[in-house]
Amino acid sequence: MNFSLFLLLLGPATAFTGTKKVILRQRASSSFLLKSRPDSSAAVADALRISKEFGGTSSEARIAWETVEEMDAADMSPAITLSSTIKSVEKLHEMEYTAKMRSLSRLLTETHENLSQIKILAANLKNLDIEDPHLSKLPDTATGLKKVLQEAKAASEVHGPESAESVAAWNEVDFCTDVMGGVGCNVDTMYHYSAAALKAHHVYDAVVDATFFQEAEDAIEMLENLRRFVRIENNRLNA
């Protein structure tokens, strides 16, 4: 073979081999950098959770974000700082506030008509009960049902509607009416209340009374006011 032709053939092959080696070195270098960089995504997620739970300026949040900063110290990308994270958390709170305000506004608007009808019916029933209390009064034969109702109303009065005492007493009412058919109802003596301990503005020998209806009217009026304020706030956020 001609020596000049041999050199021509050898040149491209040598160049190709050199290029291949460079590419392999670059890939190996990139792979090494990716493996050497710590994955801080889990730490960031944990720090965001802690910031939301305890507050962005809490000691728990500071420790969590210091951990993230330590993991990012060996990274070539800009490190996540506490100040920038606090701003991110605040932004998340703003987004959550806006979304929940919109949802509340939508629900209050959708239920407005039904609440207005409920308010009218409650007022009518209240007036009927005031004019003729016997309409809602339980008969003398419903002794067991009267007792469990009295206990449930008293528990709500003294401890609040969501208290453990109230829940237990109302469970007994449900058992009395749904299982026993209003007959053979038992009262748990540990939730027995004396007359002196009660506010006594309810009628305790009726299932519903005028006071309940009045409280329903007041609650709906509060929701109507809430709907007005929420609508204004929602418009402000959308501006």
Image (cartoon, rainbow, N blue to C red):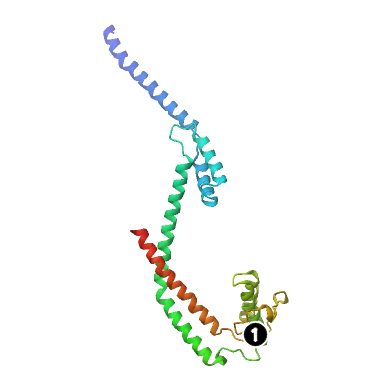
Q: Is residue 47 above or below residue 12?
A: below
Q: In the image, what residue occupies the spot 48% across and 79% down?
A: 217
Residue 225 in the image: state x and y as whole percent.
Answer: 43, 71
Would you say 26 lies left or right of 153 here? left
Quarter of the image for the C terminus: give it: bottom left
Q: Which residue is mark 1?
A: 146
Q: Check the image and report above or below for 37 versus 88.
A: above
Quadrant for the N terminus in the image: top left
Give the vertical position of 55 relative to 150 (above or below).
above
Count of numbered tags:
1
Q: Secondary structure at mark 1?
A: helix
Q: Give the image quarter of residue 195.
A: bottom right
Mark 1: few/some/many CA within 10 Å (<14, 14-19, 20+):
many
User: For the point 42% across and 80% down, which residue is it?
Assistant: 117
Position of 176 with respect to 90 (left or right) is: right
Residue 136 position in % (x across, y down): 56, 88
Amino acid type, residue under disc 1 in the picture: Lys
Is 11 left or right of 166, judged from the image as shown?
Answer: left
Q: Position of residue 119 (x, y in %)?
A: 45, 80
Q: Between residues 210 and 78, which one lies in front from this camera angle?
A: 210
In the image as oriented, which residue stretches furthest toward the right? 189
Front residue of 205 and 184: 205
Residue 189, horizontal then vertical, whole percent: 72, 77
- The answer to whether 17 is drawn above or below residue 53 in the figure is above
Instruction: Tell me the residue at 44%/51% (across/down).
Output: 92
19 to the left or right of 160: left
